[in-house]
Amino acid sequence: MNKLQKALSLNLIFSGITGILAIVFHHTIASIFAIEQSHAFWIIGIALLYFAATILLEIKKQRKIAVLWIIIQDITWVAASAIILLYNPFSISIAGNYTIATIAFIVLFMAINQYRALAQVFPKQHL
């Protein structure tokens, strides 16, 4: 297993576990976030499981453009998290904000790690 496969595997595991937890505990998470409706967490969970499935495919195929798309989605998650933290449009609790920030840092780390690993697999090509 090369470094790119390891980096993607980390994202696969984190996204898969987070997706399952969001689905199974959507009511509890909504309570922690001080949000009445829990549907969003169920939907996020489903999306994360789909995302994890696409990562699994790329662990095997390692297509540059597809891995870049995974990295872009991770960076988009981080940017959306930053916007939510800055503007708090959903009146999320402090515990919810800490959770968002923690997950955003983990996702940012994974995006950087994946990008570095991708550069090693495709060293002479511009990313």
Image (cartoon, rainbow, N blue to C red):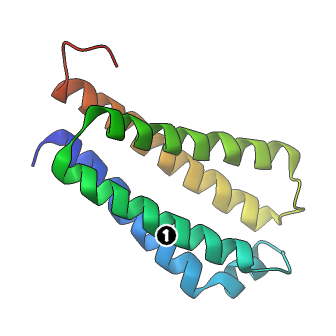
- Residue at the image position 66 percent from the left and 57 percent from the top: 100
- Residue at the image position 69 percent from the left and 58 percent from the top: 98
* Residue 44 x %, y %: 61, 67
Nearest to the observer: residue 115 or residue 39: 39
* Residue 115 x %, y %: 35, 31
Q: Quadrant of residue 110?
A: top left
* Residue 123 x %, y %: 19, 18
In the rendered image, the quadrant that contains the C terminus is: top left
**Left or right of 8 on screen, residue 34:** right
Q: Quadrant of residue 125?
A: top left
- Residue at the image position 63 percent from the left and 77 percent from the top: 42
Disc 1 crowd, CA 10 A, few/some/many (<14, 14-19, 20+): some
Count of labels in the image: 1
At label 1, the amino acid type is Thr
* Residue 17 x %, y %: 42, 72
- Residue at the image position 58 percent from the left and 49 percent from the top: 104
**Left or right of 53 on screen, residue 27:** right
Residue of label 1: 18
Is 80 located above or below residue 126 in the figure?
below
Q: Secondary structure at mark 1?
A: helix
**Left or right of 24 on screen, residue 8:** left
Q: Residue furthest left?
A: 1
